[in-house]
Image (cartoon, rainbow, N blue to C red):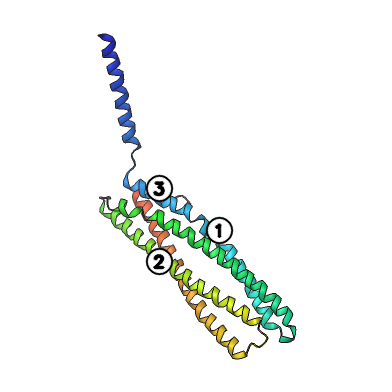
Amino acid sequence: MLYFEKKRFVIFFIAIIFILSGCAAKKTHVEKIYDVLENVVKKEKTFEEQQNPLVTLEKKEKELYDQIIGLGMKEYDQIVKISDEALQLTEKRKEHMEKETNSLKESEKEFKKVADIKEKITDTKLSKSTNELYDIMMQRYQAHEVLYKEYSVALTYDKELYRMFKNKNLSLDELEAQINKLNGTYKKVYAANENFNKLTEQYNEKKLLFYKMAGLKLNK
């Protein structure tokens, strides 16, 4: 009889340890949001990696454009060669932009997990901070969608321009019209990019504020 009582006590003790350890491991709603936000950073690593290559390609393409403009039609063969090089660069720019956009889509998919968790936060100030953080980030994703669309249009117009350069019968009016169209599109690209960067800064500020209010450590 003593053996069975001892065995029952051991099983009961193990069960208590299991329950307590389970409670200790259970994360708070704030900690769950923290995990999501840190995962978002990881999801956007590919996005960050596209920035410098894109800028480099844009500068190289601008140099090629300047070379083409500086050449006369007597150097047609050279214009064709440079235009083909520029067309290759536009394709590379497109590849980087696609990677950037796909990275942000993965980021958005992860970030949306915050939507359900934030509704369970009972602290008024933390709840307000989380809602503001969420709204700004969703605006940021929308802003990048606009940027992506405008940049895609600009790339299409760039390709059209370089193909036009390869046309011996290209008129000055046609060239001027295409350049004006490109300039108008790039104004939209710059405006969209500026808005995206502004929202990114606001998100980072709100994220830092949320971490401080929640007593969380900010991973840089």
Residue 84 position (above or below residue 40): below
At mark 3, the secondary structure is helix
- The CA span between labels 2 and 1 is 21 Å
Q: Are marks 3 and 2 in contact (CB under 8 Å)?
A: no
Amino acid type, callout 2: Gln
Q: Are marks 1 and 3 in contact (CB under 8 Å)?
A: no
| Residue highlighted by disc 2 | 142
Across and down, in percent, residue 216 comes to 38, 47
Across and down, in percent, residue 74 comes to 74, 86
Residue 107 position (above or below residue 188): above
Residue at image point 51% right, 71% down: 152
Residue 208: tell me if it is visible.
no
> Mark 2: few, some, or many residues within 10 Å (few <14, many ≥20)?
few
Tell me which numbered mark, 1 or 3, is placed earlier along the sequence.
3
> In the drawing, does residue 204 fall left or right of residue 65?
left
| Residue highlighted by disc 3 | 35
Residue situated furthest top in the rendering? 1
> In the drawing, does residue 19 fall left or right of residue 61?
left
Residue 173 position (above or below residue 191): below
Q: Which numbered tag is attached to residue 195?
A: none
> In the drawing, does residue 43 fall left or right of residue 63?
left
| Residue highlighted by disc 1 | 49
Residue at image point 55% right, 73% down: 155
Tell me which numbered mark, 3 or 2, is placed earlier along the sequence.
3
- The CA span between labels 3 and 2 is 23 Å
From the image, which quarter does the N terminus lie in? Answer: top left
- The CA span between labels 1 and 3 is 22 Å
Amino acid type, callout 1: Glu
Across and down, in percent, residue 90 comes to 60, 70
Across and down, in percent, residue 44 comes to 48, 56
At mark 2, the secondary structure is helix
